Structures are given as structure tokens and as C-alpha cells.
Image (cartoon, rainbow, N blue to C red):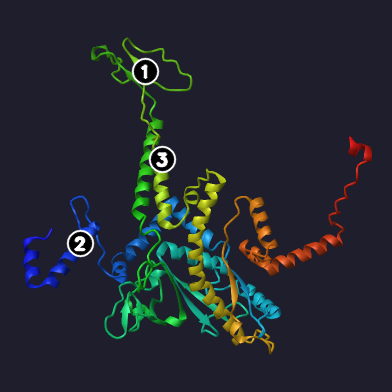
Amino acid sequence: MINPIDRFISWIAPAAAVRRAQARRVLAYYEAAKPSRLRAGKREPGSGNAAVAKAGTALREQARHMEQNHDLARGVLDVLVRNTIGTGIGVEPQPRRRNGEIHDALALQLQKLWKDWCKRPEVTWQHSWGSAERICARSWFRDGEVFAQRLLGITPFLDHGTRVPYSIELLEADLVPYDYQSMGSPRIVQGVEINGWGRPVGYYVYRNHPGDLYRLTTLADLKRLSADRMLHLKLVDRIRQLRGVSIFAAVLTRMEDLKDYEESERIAAKIAASMAAYIKKGAPDLYEPDNAGTPRQMNFRPGIIFDDLRPGEEVGVIDTNRPNANLAAHRDGQLRAIAAGTGTTYSSTSKNYNGTYSAQRQELVEGWGAYQILAAEFISRITQPVYEDFVRSALTARLLTLDADVDGETLDDAIYIAPQMPWIDPEKEANAWAALEDRVYASGPEIIRRRGANPRDVLDQQQRWRREKARRELDTPAAPAPTEKPAEEQVA
């Protein structure tokens, strides 16, 4: 219905009246945009960087505290790391000849050098490559981001410790300060220098961890590292967001509430277990204290018989209704919400694996989609750049023997094997994959990679195993052919 103001405007400026009517219909349609007494309609008007600047440090520190003090938070991180990294992302070199075939000899060279490098991949020599990947992923999920400096070739005062002269330096998010800003030239946002397009071109890093005890860290301790020397893995939700946010950001309050609730229930149950009984008296005038004026002590023990009750007294048992019968249901509901907010599955988070085969497989398939996305992000930001640096360093150090027919553009090609979805029913899964291979819907190497193994390693192991069995004359004899039954038995 047109109100008098709109009718007046339509007489003077019809186009303006139409725009007012259209705007009114839009506002009427999007009811959620209009706050009310029952709906606050909270908003986030700032940019992604502005939101992180206000809450990034607090979220990171709260997430670390939760990991240190809450078994559930530690369990969620364990589930994420185990299903995205596992024992480590497998790398299968795939250099090719000019005709497109895999160059097996060169792939074997790279595989041997990679195996040697994985023993001491980082500057402190405290982690193997698999361990370094796991600690990176854990920092990524908990803190929202992790950094690594790439150190190729001869570096002053650094012993790489491997044949290939290449190492990485793992850096926690604290070493790139949020509060280091500059709107001039160069433009620096939260410790990251960006160009006119918003692309990171440099990072400002503390030489020492600002959280170390007995050490005062100031902005004078910052050093600039070029972006091509840094690896930055982060969890972001907004376009052009430069710093990451903890995966616990949306569930921290829920986890804290659940921790407090469980602690209250534990204390209540402990107090309830300490209470035994009380003596109920009939009337106050029946109470007669002992001659000494001290209250009576009644020692409880299993099978006790009360034979000294006075007239009007009876024994009452304290019922505290603990543990709370609704605790399990309430906790399960909260765990489902936490699992949804962190991208894990409810069964893995709660360690409750009840359910049918179909239900478990459906949950596993849906949850594994989230794990694969995280693993792909980790590979693209950490594993693949590191492997490409490794190949470049090995080539520069002249550790590779190259034939004339090697396709130079494929030297650093590789297949990256992340943890694969486990089998719930091995027999059914194996038969399904065998049928796919028989019908040429899948290849043997693909099936082996889906199991998280390297096809070349599997073939080598199988070859050695069969050769060893034959040498020891342990080959399984062929099953005897079935004999035909006598004619009279067939007739019978």
C-alpha cells in the first residue's frame, strides 16, 4: 500500500518513488537484516584483516591454553593431524623423458636423495620430515598459521647435515608481530609487507621468540625476509586476509563451557561419594548429648549394623543425584557441535564408534572430505614448495645425473600421497577395488597410493619376498585338482 509521502514523491519524481518502493520490498524480504527485541543482529563490518587484528592474538593464546589443559582440545588436534598428515606426506618423484615416459633411473636418484634429506630437514635437527610436517600442521590448526624460512645452498654458520644443501627454519606465528604496521611506503599490515595489489612481498620476523623468559624483545629486533624465502600456511575465511585464525575460533567458548560443566559434575560426584548417611531424630527434646558434651561419632564400615540408635532416631541416606543422568546426553550434543565447528567427525572426537556399518561409512566419507581439503592445502603450501626447493638444490649441487632425453620442465614433478580413508570392512573394500581394477576403472598403482603406499616400494618388497620364499622352498603348493566321483556315486 502506498503511503502519502510516496504518493507525493511519485507525483514529483516517479523514478524516485519506484526506487523507494523497491528498497522497501528488499528490506521487507530480508527480515534478518533488521534487528529486533528478540534478535540482536550482531554484525562484522570490518575487513578480514581488521577482525584478525582485534582478536588474532587472544584466540591464539586461548587455543594454546585449551590444548595444554583440556583433553578434548588436544584430542581434536590429534585427530586433525593424524588424518591430514599421518606419518608424513608421501612424495613419489615423477620426472619424465621427452617422450612422456617416467624416467625411472632419475626418479630413483631423487628418491634416495629425498630419503637422506628427510632425516634432517630443518635447522635444529630435532625433527625428521614427517615430524616437522606434523608439528607444522599442529601449529597451523591451533594457532591459525605457521611460517618457515627456506634456506637454499651455502648459508653462513649453518650445517645442513644432508647431502642436498637445503634446510627450512620453522617459525611460530608469534615471531611475525600483529602490531607492526605502516601505512606509508612500504605498506606493512600485521607484520606483512604488501604491494599495491595486496600481494605479500616481505615478512618482518623477530630474531628471537617474544615469549621467551628473561629476554626483552622490541621492534628493533625485527628483520625483513623476502616473501620468496618464506612459506606461510594459514587458515583464512576472508578474501585478502593476510594472517590466519585458529580452527578453534568458533568453538572456544563452547569448549570452555563444557570443560567447566564437566569439572563441576566431577566435583559434585566426588562430594556425593564422600557423603554416607545422617541420623534423623524424631523431635528436638529427644536429643540427649553425651556426658562429655561432644557429638557422637559413628564409624561406617561394610556390613555395619546400627545397634546404638536412641529412641526416635533413624538412619537416613543422602541422595545427591550424582552423577547427573543427563550429563552424557548433554556432552554428546556439545561434542557434535564442536566436531562440526572444527571439521572433525563426531565419532573421532568423542571416541564413540557405536553405529551400523552404513552409518559409520557415511560419517567417514563426509569427514574425510574435510581432511582431504586440509591435506591438499598443506601440500600446496608446504610439501610441494619444499620438494621443489629440494630438487633445485640437488641440481645446483650437481648431485643428479641427467640424460640427454630428460624433460627439464618435469624434474620436480611428483605425486604427493596424503593419508587415505581407512577401510571399515577390509574384505568388502578389497573386493570393490579388485573389481574396479579388473574392469580398468582403476590402476594398480592408484590403488596402492590410495592405501598410502608407494607402488615402487610395494613391488620391490613383493619381489624380494617371493625370491626369499623360493630360496627357502616356502612356496605354497598348488591346490590339488578335484577328482571325479565314481559313476555309482554320481548316480546315487
- Of labels 3 and 1, earlier in sequence is 1
Residue 240 appears left or right of 381: left
Q: Is label 3 in a helix, a strand or a loop? A: helix
* Residue identified by numbered label 2: 25
* Location of residue 213 with respect to 388 vertically, above or below: above
* Residue identified by numbered label 3: 329
> Extreme bottom residue here?
404
310 and 53: which one is in front? 53
Q: Is label 1 in a helix, a strand or a loop? A: strand
Q: Could you tell me residue 274's position as x and y percent? A: 40, 31
Identified at 48% across, 69% down, the residue is 377
Q: Amino acid at mark 1?
A: Val
- Of labels 3 and 2, earlier in sequence is 2
Q: Amino acid at mark 2?
A: Arg
Front position among marks 1 and 2 = 2
* Location of residue 437 with respect to 428 vertically, above or below: below
Q: Could you tell me residue 486's position as x and y percent? A: 93, 40
